[in-house]
Amino acid sequence: MTDQNIIEISGVEKRFGTFTAVKDLNLTLKEGEFFSLLGPSGCGKTTALRMIAGFQDHDAGTIRIAGQDMAHIPANKRPANMVFQSYAIFPHLNVGDNVAFGLRKLGLSKAEMKDRVAEALEMVELGGLQARKADELSGGQRQRVALARALVMRPKVLLLDEPLSALDKNLREAMQLEMRRLQQKLGITFVMVTHDQYEAMTMSDRIGVMFAGKLEQVDRPEVLYARPCNRRVASFIGGMNFLDARVTGDNGSTVDVNVQGFGPLTIDVNPNALSRSPDLLAGIRPEQLEIGAERPEGYDACLQGIVSDIAFYGESVHYYVRTDGMEDPVSVAVPNYFHTVDHKRGDQVWLGVQNASVIDLGAREA
Amino acid sequence: MSTPASDQLNKPMASSLSKPMRKPFRFPWLLAYAIGYLIFLYLPVLLLPLFSFNDGTIVAFPMKGFTLKWYAQLGEQDTLLQAMMNSLIVGAVTALVATSLGLFAARAYVRYRFKGRELSEGLVMLPLVIPGIIVASSMLVLFISLGLRPSLTTVILGHVFVALPFAVSIMKSAFDDFDQSLEEAAFDLGESVIGTFRRVTLPIVAPGIVASLLVTFTVSFDEFVLAFFLSGNQPTLPVYIWSQIRFPAKLPNTLALGSLLLLASVLLLLTAEYFRRRSTKST
């Protein structure tokens, strides 16, 4: 990644009739960055991607790629190429001709074209498959051909629309790592749209989380996980217990709060939180809670409750603990190795939490 | 080719297989009906080729003997060959015009959501249900009032009108399974709008285009009413055949010609169906 800005989007808006698909989008991407737009379906992330690609005009604002204003520049003249969700492999052409499709317009010699096709196929580990017919490809191979066909153009920006959603789980996970490696090797900026939080977190340098047309937070995956800006972002990335809290004292970078169920705690002020209020929303990740039959030692606050449900996830076990005065049960994730404590439904348990595990999510009504 | 009749034949047989094998014999009414229906439908058509080999001018049993002379005489009849030529020209031009129009119309109907789409689609399909005689007479009045003399041109205009619904529906099925992102991908890879159409859209819908060309050609080639009203002194083949049928001596020639046309039509439609199926499978 360099310090050079490659995509600069400011104040971009897109309306379809009375529906605003993308509201006031501001985003700056660095050259060589792997960026993901994450959000539920219909949040406007694909529309945003298609505006960068040039398949959709924007109604307001500016989009610049490599310093150049993209208004009035059609998709076929932009230094960006796209990998489609359906892969859009041309069914009447073989693999080699699919990959060479865009090269025909560049005025290369036959030998140069052949070399670049071979190089691109090598890159996606499909070397030598030039003659393979489009309908003889597996799902994973189609994805690779689509990738090679876009990368062979040597774009400044590669746009990926849910590139892995059509693959089964194992293949998807292998491709996540492979695409990340490829991106780092080539140093091309990747912009990926996905609704899969794990995909976004494992692959991206930074993630932008979108809801209802608005980009709510842009951050590195670790920051997004540790310091989400509000309830929506927090609940879309990982699991989260939401608890009401009341600010009782302000110490500058930390606040004293009284957290529902747990009582007094002193937590860090979240610089990302979008709003402030004495009525705070506190978040606790399920894996940051301790659970035990006895009151756990060395925790900043504890809570007693009854196990209402148990879910087995393989690598972890989730306990749902009900306490008086709380509507939703608190969920606790316990890693499943040397896991000897085995609570049953209806058991009395204690939960323990540290100050550092409680996240300030800003005003409760946000 | 799947005709309504063969569907009726297949369904009851398929469902009877899934039932227990041992059951009391019942007269297969449905099967009998289906077979009777097929005989009624196709027997007269089969008589046509049969009598075209009959060594006699009267179409009646018993037949007199086998001959190929009615076929041999066809080549010597100049007016017949001229009529055949007229039909080929009208059919070819009609097929080209109707298929081109159908191609663009179908792409728009499948791809875009616009005001009046359903209305315009309905209007395009209307010729399928308007009686030919009404279309023919009103077109004749229209063309004459516009100063167009009845000729092959007016026949072509009429035939495009009746062939268009066929072209549109065949092309629509070709576009139905066509992933829109294929065109976007081509455009994204630097190709122009026209280049995208030529390098991606056309090759992918090509089987549909061939099917549409063949079907619209056949529609035009077989059409009688419009051609009768609009052809003036340039008869197409069906109009010519109709004029010859009044002369008993010419009847065997007409039968021979009709048999050849029947064979050609069936072959054309089978080819068209082959391409239509390929077009829906390819994407």
Image (cartoon, rainbow, N blue to C red):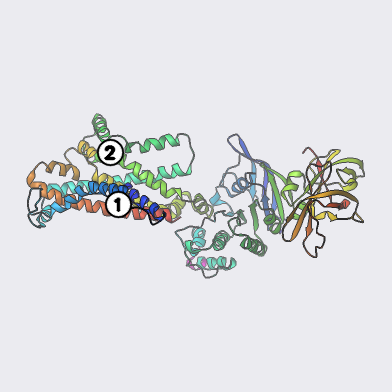
Q: Which residues are magenta?
A: A107-112
Relative placement, left or right, of B10 versus A190 is left
Residue A164 place in picture, x, y as percent: 61, 57
Q: Position of residue A224 (x, y in %)?
A: 76, 51
Mark 1 belongs to which amino acid? Leu
Question: Which residue appears at 55% of the width and 47% of the height?
Answer: A74
Residue A340 appears in which quarter of the rendering?
bottom right
- Name the residue at 29% across, 44% down: B94
Pick the front one: B240 or A52: B240
How packed is label 1: few (under 14 Cα within 10 Å), some, or many (20 or more)? some
User: Of all residues shown, which one is farthest toward the front?
Assistant: B24
The chain letter for the residue carrying disc 2 is: B
**Which dot, 2 or 1, sits closer to the camera?**
1
Whether residue A59 is visible, yes or no, is: yes
Q: Are marks 2 and 1 on the same chain?
A: yes
- What type is the residue that disc 2 sits on? Gly
| Crowd class of label 2 (few under 14; some 14 to 19; many from 20; radius 10 Å) | many
The numbered mark at residue B269 is 1
Q: Please give the residue where the numbered disc 2 appears in the rendered image.
A: B158
- Chain to which mark 1 belongs: B
Q: Nearer the viewer, residue B41 or A26?
A: B41
